[in-house]
Image: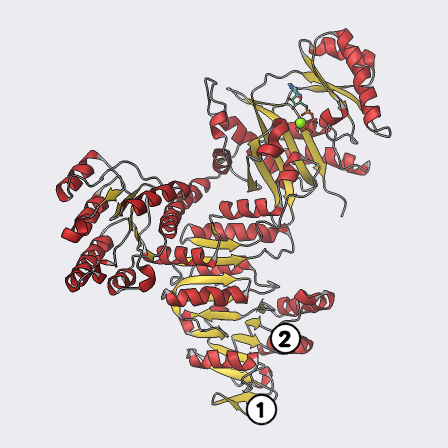
């Protein structure tokens, strides 16, 4: 049983700090509990004594007569520790601390939080908050917040009480309510993943909404727990999230190309995607999603039909369709034939289907055309846009007719196996027939973009479910079983010498431990040795400076390509060593690395960086020297399996460059996915690693070639 059952389904609740003073939090919460008719015992704990809302009060929680599942604590921080001790003594299972003045105010508050957590963990009591606005649960009619919340199909978990109020205002006007509602405050104990896990099993939650500012993490395991919990929940019900701070989190300074591209925001975004969470931008969009997911049938794909009574709105919907990941394909001949029988010859019927003035003569064309579109197996959803809801203004007869047609359309929509959303110019006015439509599970929007975006979300969710199912297959490439110990031995030796930068020859060795195919490379420490090595390698050879103090070798004039003789190798050795010293006079130069010149292909980058919230990550992108300019990269939190790596590669904007564009042969995408997959396991197993760059990796028709490898270790903590 989830630890959060006593939070959302308590048999009894105690409010500590209950008050009869209408200016106090302890009064507002008491009022919510009583007025919402909590289906269990309510105990008020107050030091002032007397009665509150006709309930007796108790001086402390230990004097409460019955058992207490849930305690709501609304007292000043300075009293919190003894009160929590008493709660533990009483056997309270969950406590919500709504008071403020903890970690959010400074180091003293943080210390207080540390002690609170210690008491809670020792006493087996789960803790929500502090600095939060409480909880609501329709299961027990529990309103342990100060907001007027109503029952319904959504669950909402927020990091900001004010957004809770904001969203609730909107929810009320749309007649949307909650199964579970919770504000998590400082996330001291209960974190997002705890709530996501609980809501997975809550039958009444049809959709889960999150408002996130960030995850509180003690270790990166917390970030991963969130991903795991969300994945499990998202296959059962849609999760939509606002995550603020898109603009704030720029990329940080990093040693590798991957590190400089992997800002915390990029990783958070990738983690949400990986977790199957739909990201939206505003409270409005969050509720649009909630309304659609709680009302509509699921979309099987992204092909939509648009039904309109005015050209402009129809075309606008078509434009938005593309933006929101939908397609409005030309309707099949069979469907067009049926539409021709209903409509006049001047009406466009390819998609959008434009009624173009016919409804004034015969309102039933709406109903008949909708019926045809709903029955078309090549249509996954229908969007109605335009004037519907406004015909009533024209005459009394139209008013009746509009309602009759609405009823018939609703009947067809509820019998159909695909979603329908509607836009109406008259949505704001809420005419009777639109109210009827909306109450009967067809979302009605006042803006075309909102209607189309929301249909896009329905289609996106069906894609997410498909991907999550596909990605649950644990397919992995072969990796040597002794990989970890071998690689660790190399890393430990480097750490002991006090370095965190591996030189390329060392990085290559680590990659080899993991079974990655990478050309032999040799270190020359003199010009003579370089000449000797040239004759050993033969053909065209690449020479690179090897120094832990020179991270980007090209910048130091430290790379020479197409070396084709012993003599040239000798000269190049001297030149590269001199360039290295010129670049950085005190650089520790190990020598010059020599390896065979690789066949070139499409330049890619495969890398990894360490994220403080989610731990090691893996990145794939179009690379080479322009990777930071193109920023065409995708991320996953490591480790990942092959199906996830395949979808990571498919996410790239420039995918066509890898699939064979303008006469080039398609690249071996499977080999790229395998290398990314192995890197993801490498960084997951070798936690000393902070950053990895394989840049460039040449994607070839068969396999790939790794031309450069960089590994940077974590700074000693
Ligand atoms: N073995 C090789 N075969 C063919 N070309 C190579 C090889 N090694 C390097 N190159 C080419 O030389 C360029 C520079 O080499 P490399 O990536 O090792 O240097 P770098 O300056 O350290 O890289 P970065 O820009 O990642 O810091 C590569 O982008 C690649 O085009
Ligand atoms: Mg490079």
Q: Is mark 1 within 8 Å of ligand 1?
A: no
Q: Position of residue 268 (x, y in %)?
A: 57, 48
Closer to the camera, 528 or 410? 410
Q: Is residue 193 left or right of residue 290?
A: right
Q: Position of residue 53 (x, y in %)?
A: 48, 87
Q: Quadrant of residue 569?
A: top right
Q: Position of residue 63 (x, y in %)?
A: 58, 86
Q: Which residue is mark 2?
A: 84
- The residue sitting at 31% across, 56% down in the picture is 425
Q: Is residue 574 left or right of residue 27?
A: right
Residue 200 visible: no
Toward the front, the furthest residue is: 394
Closer to the camera, 476 or 132? 132
| Circle number at residue 161 | none
- The residue sitting at 49% across, 48% down in the picture is 275
Residue 15 visible: yes
Q: Which residue is mark 1?
A: 49
Label 2 or label 1, whichever lies nearer to me, is: 1
- The residue sitting at 48% across, 78% down in the picture is 12
- Quote the CA–CA distance across marks 2 and 1: 20 Å
Q: Is residue 412 left or right of residue 227?
A: left
Tags 2 and 1 in contact by the CB under 8 Å rule? no
Toward the right, the furthest residue is: 586
First in sequence, mark 2 or 1: give its number: 1
Identify whether 444 is placed above or below 712.
below
Identify whether 319 is placed above or below 232.
above
């Amino acid at each position: 049983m989830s630890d959060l059952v006593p939070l959302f389904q308590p048999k009894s609740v105690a409010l500590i700090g209950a008050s009869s003073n209408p200016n106090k939090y302890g009064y507002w919460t008491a009022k919510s509990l009583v007025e919402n008719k909590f289906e269990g015992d309510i105990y008020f704990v107050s030091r002032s004594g007397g009665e509150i809302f006709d309930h007796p009060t108790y001086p402390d929680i230990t004097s409460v007569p019955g058992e207490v599942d849930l305690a709501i604590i609304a007292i000043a921080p300075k009293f919190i520790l003894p009160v929590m001790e008493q709660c533990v003594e009483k056997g309270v299972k969950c406590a919500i601390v709504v008071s403020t003045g903890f970690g959010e105010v400074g180091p003293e508050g943080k210390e207080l939080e540390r002690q609170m957590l210690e008491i809670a963990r020792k006493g087996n009591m789960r803790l929500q908050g502090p600095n939060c606005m409480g909880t609501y649960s329709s299961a027990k009619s529990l309103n342990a917040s100060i907001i007027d919340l109503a029952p319904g199909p959504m669950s909402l978990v927020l990091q900001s009480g004010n957004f809770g109020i904001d969203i609730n205002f909107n929810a009320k006007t749309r007649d949307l309510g909650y199964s579970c509602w919770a504000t998590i405050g400082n996330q001291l104990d209960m974190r997002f993943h705890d709530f996501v896990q609980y809501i997975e099993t809550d039958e009444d939650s049809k959709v889960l909404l999150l408002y996130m500012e960030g995850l509180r993490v003690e270790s990166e395991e917390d970030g991963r727990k969130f991903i795991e919990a969300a994945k499990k929940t998202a296959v059962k019900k849609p999760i939509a999230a606002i995550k603020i701070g898109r603009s704030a989190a720029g990329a940080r300074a990093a040693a590798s190309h991957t590190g400089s591209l992997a800002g915390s925001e990029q990783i958070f975004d990738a983690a949400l995607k990986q977790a199957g969470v739909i990201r939206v931008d505003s409270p409005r969009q969050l509720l649009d999603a909630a309304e659609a997911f709680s009302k509509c049938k699921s979309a099987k794909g992204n092909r939509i039909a648009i039904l309109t009574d005015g050209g402009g709105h129809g075309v606008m919907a078509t434009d938005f369709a593309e933006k929101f990941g939908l397609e409005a394909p030309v309707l099949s001949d069979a469907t067009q034939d049926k539409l021709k029988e209903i409509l006049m010859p001047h009406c466009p019927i390819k998609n959008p289907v434009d009624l173009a003035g016919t409804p004034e003569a015969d309102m039933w064309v709406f109903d008949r055309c909708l019926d045809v579109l709903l029955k078309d197996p090549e249509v996954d959803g229908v969007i109605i846009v335009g004037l519907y809801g406004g015909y009533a203004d024209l005459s009394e007869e139209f008013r009746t007719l509009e309602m009759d047609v609405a009823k018939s359309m609703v009947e067809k929509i509820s019998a159909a196996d695909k979603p329908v959303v509607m836009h109406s110019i008259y949505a704001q006015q809420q005419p009777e027939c639109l109210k009827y439509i909306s109450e009967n599970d067809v979302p009605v929007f006042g803006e075309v973009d909102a209607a189309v975006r929301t249909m896009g979300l329905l289609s996106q969710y069906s894609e997410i479910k498909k991907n999550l199912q596909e990605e649950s297959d644990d397919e992995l490439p072969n990796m040597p079983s002794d990989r970890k110990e071998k690689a660790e031995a190399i890393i430990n030796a480097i750490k002991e010498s006090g370095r965190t930068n591996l030189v390329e020859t060392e990085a290559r060795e680590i990659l080899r431990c993991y079974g990655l195919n990478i050309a032999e490379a040799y270190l020359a420490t003199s010009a003579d040795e370089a000449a000797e090595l040239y004759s050993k390698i033969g053909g065209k050879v690449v020479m690179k400076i090897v120094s832990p103090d020179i991270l980007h070798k090209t910048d130091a004039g430290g790379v020479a390509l197409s070396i084709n003789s012993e003599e040239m190798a000798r000269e190049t050795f001297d030149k590269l060593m001199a360039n290295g010293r010129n670049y950085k006079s005190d650089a520790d130069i190990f020598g010059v690395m020599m390896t065979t010149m690789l066949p070139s292909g499409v330049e890619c980058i495969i890398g990894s960086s360490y994220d403080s919230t989610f731990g090691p990550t893996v990145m794939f992108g179009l690379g080479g020297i322009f990777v930071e300019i193109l920023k065409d990269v995708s991320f996953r939190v490591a480790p990942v399996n092959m199906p996830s790596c395949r979808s990571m590669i498919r996410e790239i904007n420039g995918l066509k460059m890898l699939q064979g564009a303008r006469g080039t042969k398609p690249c071996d995408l499977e080999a790229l996915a395998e290398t990314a997959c192995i890197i993801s396991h490498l960084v997951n197993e070798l936690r000393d690693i902070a950053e990895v760059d394989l840049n460039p990796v040449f994607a070839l028709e068969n396999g790939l070639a790794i031309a450069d490898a960089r590994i940077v270790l974590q700074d000693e903590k």
